[in-house]
Amino acid sequence: MTKECKDLLTGFTGNEIKTLLDGLDEMQQTETKDGLTHENRLLRLEADLQKLKQRGAKIPGFGPIDPEGSALIERPGAAFVKSQQFKSWVESPGQRGRCAVAVPLRTKAATNIITSAGVPPGGERLAGIVGYPIAPPAMLALIPSAPMTMDKVTYLKLLSRPTPGAASQFPEGSAKAEQSFDIGPAEAVAVTIAAWTSCSTQALSDIRQLQHFLDETLTALTLDEADRQTLLGTGAAAGQLEGLLSQAVPYNTALTLTGDSVLDVISHAVTQLATSGIMASAAVLSPTDAERARLIKTTDGSYVLQQPTIGTLPNLWGLTLAIDSHMTPGSFLVGRFARDSVELLDREQAMVEASREHGDYFVKNLVALRCELRAALACYQPGAFVAGALPATPPAMAMAANGPKK
């Protein structure tokens, strides 16, 4: 019974818990003076601990209670600190190797940032570290993913649509339509994207803080950089992914008419792809340009896209609208985000590692923590994407955006 009560204390600290533990130790040594048996006292303590466990579900850093109400839903950081590899590593102070545990990637906003200066030891620690949020990776949500088994993949890239196209055979016995394919070999090279920080070995015992840090910071920073490179990366020569903006075909500016708005140019880009037989699925805009599109009004002052009270993102001409903080304001990307056009190839899952073997960390009781992934971007059809510049809001549209004159 005593072991069961102590098991319930996992993850909790504070004077309340200390009092309960002292009570358990006292009962193991002597009978109580109030006539209660050990079993009754333990039952009371167990009930108190169950209440504390329920309150613990509301502590920052813990996941929510599962639908059955019997356990906490684990975050990736929790999976790391509760893994057998981590427990064996941290319980062996003389261990000088490293601990590596694969965790699932998260595509949610992070709320904490810690720099490589690390987390210093100190007094009582709060269950979190105040920092700035990181936007969800919009590009990673759009691009399909697939595994890769080597450090690079060679594939055939379709550079243009086959010509002249199929045709009827007439008259009978005449030559059939021969097709010309513009296909070239290409390589997708896996790049390493990582983020790290350090903390004291004392901080490792603060499970709530460590869970929150691993879940909300290192993984989010790593994903954020991967998202940036899928859009703006300059290629393997610079140790980066080759982003879609550099591979997409240029927007045909001849399609833009005087007075066109953001919405008009996106429609023109969809048409440019459609004339080549490509059905676009999404448009990527910067937060600034997404707002410009949202604020366009009719001459009677009504919003064109949606009313402010509607919380969901609108579609643009049937396309998914992705708002990416890495997109340069004034630019856009429209394309077919499907496996026949582009894939993000996963060489190694995001890996969270802890090690004392860094500089003088061993003698200073410091631990280095790192999140790392390896991936490559394969764009099979560059012609399935169009990138270009958006027009400035024309005077007539600016007047309409302010509503009708009184």
Image (cartoon, rainbow, N blue to C red):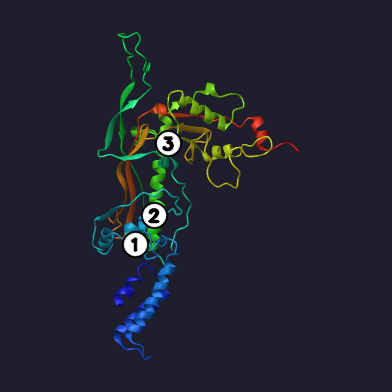
| Count of labels in the image | 3
In-front residue for pair 202/102? 102
Q: Choose top left, top right, bottom left or bottom right for residue 259.
A: top right
Residue 270 falls left or right of residue 358 = right
Most extreme residue toward the front, as rendered? 172
User: The disc labelled 1 sits on which kind of residue?
Assistant: Leu
Q: Is residue 289 positioned above or below 204 on the image?
A: above
From the image, tell me which residue sits under label 1: 204
How far, Cα to Cα, is label 1 from label 2? Answer: 15 Å
Of 213 and 239, the residue lying toward us = 213
Which amino acid does the dot numbered 3 rest on? Leu
Q: Position of residue 122 (x, y in %)?
A: 40, 65
Could you tell me if residue 26 is visible in this image? no
Label pair 1/3, CB-CB below 8 angstroms? no
Residue 325 in picture, x, y percent from top left: 49, 41
Quarter of the image that includes the N terminus? bottom left
> Which amino acid is tagged 2?
Asp
Mark drawn on residue 231: 3
